[in-house]
Image (spheres, rainbow, N blue to C red):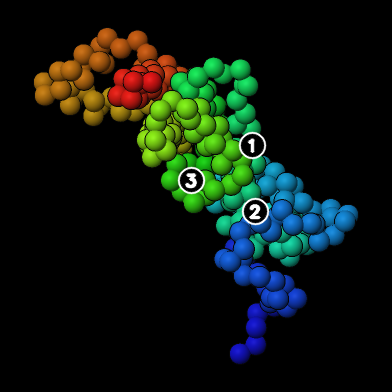
Amino acid sequence: MASKKTADAEGRRPSGSAADAPDPAEVSLWERLDRPAPAPRATLTPQKIAAAAVRIADTDGIEAVTMRRLATELGVAPMAAYRYVSGKGDVLDLMTDAVYADLQLPDDLENWREVMRAHALRTREIVLRHPWLIQISSPQALRALTPSRMASAERALSSLDGLGLDVDTMMAVVGTVASYVHGAVSAECAQYSLMQEQGWDSPDDLRIALGPQMRYLMSTGRYPTYHRYLREAVHKDDPQWRFETGLDSVLDGIAARLDI
């Protein structure tokens, strides 16, 4: 059977001269990109590919990032990007690495808690700016294995080094904080997404839409503590406060449990 000469819409590498290259499954994207550029004056770079893909995802969602749309955005031939990536999976990795490159922490943080807290707050900022990250990554996902995300994980992990913890416990602490961040920000992004889909401009619009269901449920008398929350809460519309309060509770628990 004759080999295919063109790539499909989501980008399997075409055969021909490129078919002689190592199988991408055997050589990681990052190893390939660390090698010398194939052309000294390349007009297309991994950084440009990532930046264009991020712009598309930020504007139209992650589903809009296709190899064809990317080529149009970059103003290049449809096959040009295959010099650097084997398909959309590599593009998603480049996008993830590019946005997490912004996760820079101050150098003067003094202890593990300051590092963990700053890391969590900065991660939330990045994900809220690029909510498509929730769809393609999680704290345990393989897509976390990019240079920028590994660098941020190294900073968090190294803040616990020298405190008398074994490495398994150190990693459990980092993973616990990351899981809190991922869960809390996922819920926040889901609410924003729902509001956008429904054309609701504020949390008040959301409450009005859910009003009939909530009034009935509260009228049953089965949820007295939740009813009290609805009457007395002053931070309903302050996601930053909720995030930081939950984060501090997690950090307090870690400090008490491990005596650090």
80 w.r.t. 141: above or below:
below
Q: Residues within 10 Å of mark 1 (few under 14, many from 20)?
A: some
Q: Residues within 10 Å of mark 3 (few under 14, many from 20)?
A: some
Tell me the residue at 56%/18% (across/down): 109
- The tag earlier along the polypeptide, 2 or 3, is 2
Badge nearest the viewer, 2 or 3: 2
Residue 215 position, x and y percent, is 21, 23
The Cα–Cα distance between marks 2 and 1, rounded to whole angstroms, is 15 Å
The amino acid on which the numbered mark 2 sits, given as a three-letter code, is Trp
The Cα–Cα distance between marks 2 and 3, rounded to whole angstroms, is 18 Å
Residue 256 in sight in this render? yes
The amino acid on which the numbered mark 1 sits, given as a three-letter code, is Ala
Residue 137: which disc?
Answer: 3
Query: Which element type, helix, strand or loop, lies under badge 1?
Result: loop
The amino acid on which the numbered mark 3 sits, given as a three-letter code, is Ser
Q: Are marks 2 and 3 in contact (CB under 8 Å)?
A: no
Write down the residue under mark 1.
101
